[in-house]
Image: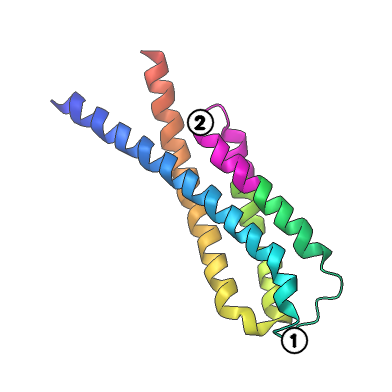
Amino acid sequence: MVKMLKMVEMVSNRKFFIYFLQFSGIVEMIVALAFFTFPLFADLLEIDLGIPLFFLFSAISFFALGFLLWYATKDPYTYRIIIYVSCAFRFLMVIPEVSTIVFYPRFLSILLIGLGYDWFSSILTLILLKKYCKSHENTEDK
């Protein structure tokens, strides 16, 4: 009975991890669309962006990373390098987010939400990935 409960818990943790990775990948792709369209709305908000290449290149990067993260759900153990890179990328996003808060204080609330999401999702992803890899190695040994 105890062994059966552990199996159910392991399966539910795995499913939650897969769904969470898919959700994170979709969020990254939505953020990419927001970055892609932001220069169009910057004029309406009377924000001088200069040359908006940063936003376009960022949109491409976010979309590619979101797609790779979503693709990694096919086999998170095999594609865990994608998950590690995604987490590192989200941890490093603190630097441009904080510098943007300094230069554009009107975006403080949006950037704080983004900062919180980046940190929370990265930490949760790493915890769930560690559990997933451990359970994967335990089932592989048997």
Residue underneath mark 2:
74
For the C terminus, the quadrant is top left
Q: Residue at x 72, y 51 (%)?
A: 61
Q: Secondary structure at mark 2?
A: helix
Q: Quadrant of residue 110?
A: bottom right
Q: Position of residue 126 (x, y in %)?
A: 50, 44
Q: Quadrant of residue 137?
A: top left
Which amino acid is tagged 1?
A: Glu
Could you say which is closer to the camera, residue 41 or residue 28? 41
Which amino acid is tagged 2?
A: Lys
Q: Residue at x 61, y 43 (%)?
A: 67
For this orientation, the residue located farthest to the top is 142
Range covered by the magenta-colored residues: 65-85
Residue underneath mark 1:
46
Q: Residue at x 37, y 19 (%)?
A: 139
Whole-number angstrom distance, CA of label 2 to CA of label 1: 43 Å
Q: Secondary structure at mark 1?
A: loop
Indicate whether 20 appears above or below 92: above
Q: Residue at x 41, y 41 (%)?
A: 17
- Badge count: 2
